Image (cartoon, rainbow, N blue to C red):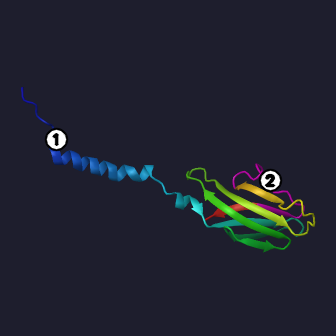
Amino acid sequence: MLFKKNTSPGRTKLNLLIFLFFTIPFFVHSEQNLEGNYTNIKILDKISSKNILVKLKNGEVKRHKDLLIKSMKCKNSKFDDNPEIIAYIQVRDLTNKNKDDVFVFNNWMFSSSPSITPFDHPVYDIRLVSCY
């Protein structure tokens, strides 16, 4: 008994290449696109009720009035339907003369739910805005 193939040998390889060409980009994502070099935070002065947008380069310290702010790392979420921005931020209060308590805030900050790790300060409030 003689068996016949339904497809030619070249056609199967072509179909496989077309399939791989269109499906691989959906499964492979780049981590460089998720991690940013700059973090934008909004600082609210509770006394004067003024908002100030501050751009921080990751790893550099920036001074804003009585605060020294440093963004160590920031990341964007993989999902576009519910975007989440996270950043590791360190804040030091210069008016605090007690050397035992170095940082007022030293933790991850989340853009969608800032109450998970709140920034508690009598004068300032900090919110995470973006990461790029």
If the image is split into quadrants, where does the N terminus sit? top left
- Label 1 sits on a secondary structure element that is loop
In screen coordinates, is 74 left or right of 69?
A: left
User: Marks 1/2: CA distance?
Assistant: 63 Å
Characterize the local packing of mark 1: few (<14), some (14-19) or many (20 or more) Cα atoms within 10 angstroms. few
Identity of the amino acid at label 2?
Pro
Characterize the local packing of mark 2: few (<14), some (14-19) or many (20 or more) Cα atoms within 10 angstroms. some
Q: Which residue is mark 1?
A: 7
- Label 2 sits on a secondary structure element that is loop
If the image is split into quadrants, where does the C terminus sit? bottom right
Q: Quadrant of residue 66?
A: bottom right
Q: Which residues are magenta?
A: 111-126
**119 falls in the magenta region:** yes
Q: Main secondary structure of the magenta part?
A: loop
Q: Give me the residue at 76% from left, 62% from top.
A: 90
Q: Which residue is mark 2?
A: 118
In screen coordinates, is 39 left or right of 120?
A: left
Q: Give percent across and percent down for residue 10.
A: 17, 48
**43 falls in the magenta region:** no
